Image (tube, rainbow, N blue to C red):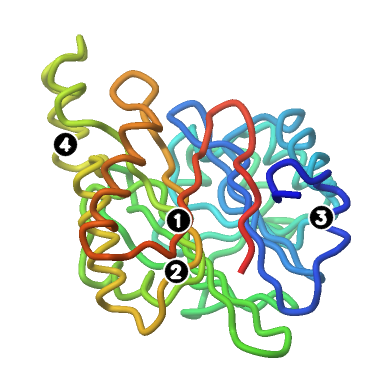
Amino acid sequence: MPIGILPLCLYFASIVKNQLSTCVLGSSSAGNATLVWNARTAVLIDCGFGPVTIAKRLQELGLRFQDLDGVFLTHIHGDHVNEPTIRKLVKECIPIYCPPEIEHHLRKKYKTLTSASREKLFAPIEKSDIELDTLCIRAFEVPHNSPGGCFGYSVSSHDGGRTKKVSVSTDMACATNSALDQIANSDIIVIESNYDVEMLEQSHRPAWLKHRIRDDGHLSNDQCAESLLQIIDRSQTLPKCLALAHVSQQCNTNALAHECTGLALDGQGILEITLHETHPDRPSSVMTA
């Protein structure tokens, strides 16, 4: 039975040692959250939905808030950080992490994070990596129009056997060499494919917003596809799964995003990678490395 229709609580229970799984709980300008987990450890990257929504989507995976070992924030925008969810995380004593560059900006915007700091539940990542049981999490900077900057994350599993790696970058104005290098050699990649150029230009959005999206906001379908080819060129092994995230509901469709990336991969003779859709209102299928 395909993973997407397997009862997910049973799927979680069946995970064997050193499998690393990913599910995009939701992704769009209305909210973003991605779960990465193995048999012993689970982390959430961003928490842009309310606590009821996240609890429901975790439950579909056989998990509860209390099963999270940590939450990692990418930047301060409200589609990535939901303050009621932050309050829920603090209540459940779940640690929240971020790169030091955005700590002040997050505490300034989300008052609950100030009290979380006092309770030692919100802390900057002091080193290049942070280890939570069997997972190693590394932040890497990506360009995006957000105070203090924006970051992606790579999550690696070292629970015996070959190291598995998931990289998540849902907001990225352009693909820098340093970001591409960090994402390289990932088994699973979650990357944004935000807008179709023609749909954006023909939309009724004001000129300043179109400019902001194009120049320092998000990757287009074409830019996403090109970035993925560059990542593959830097990698020793092909990724197993790609999830195209943050697909604009007004200026893109999953079909267009997948067609663009699919054609780019096909043009290079790369047929082994599975493409996955993400949605604003429901989880993606489960991807496993």
Q: Which-is-in-front pick, marks 4 and 2? A: 2
Task: Judge whether 118 appears above or below 76 on screen.
Answer: below
Task: Judge whether 142 appears above or below 112 on screen.
Answer: below
Kind of residue at disc 3: Tyr
Q: Earlier in the sequence, mark 3 or mark 2?
A: 3
Q: Are marks 1 and 2 in contact (CB under 8 Å)?
A: yes
Marker disc for residue 51 = none
Q: Few, some or many C-alpha atoms within 10 Å of disc 1 (few <14, some 14-19, many ≥20)?
A: many
Q: Secondary structure at mark 1?
A: strand
Q: Residue at x 18, y 32 (%)?
A: 212
Residue occupied by mark 3: 11
- Front residue (pair 78, 24): 24
Kind of residue at disc 2: Pro
Q: Few, some or many C-alpha atoms within 10 Å of disc 3 (few <14, some 14-19, many ≥20)?
A: some
Kind of residue at disc 1: Leu
- Distance Cα–Cα, label 1 vs label 2: 7 Å
Q: Earlier in the sequence, mark 4 or mark 3?
A: 3
Residue occupied by mark 1: 242
Using residue 223 as the reference point, say whether residue 284 is left or right of it. Answer: right
Residue occupied by mark 2: 239
Marker disc for residue 214 = 4
Q: Earlier in the sequence, mark 3 or mark 1?
A: 3
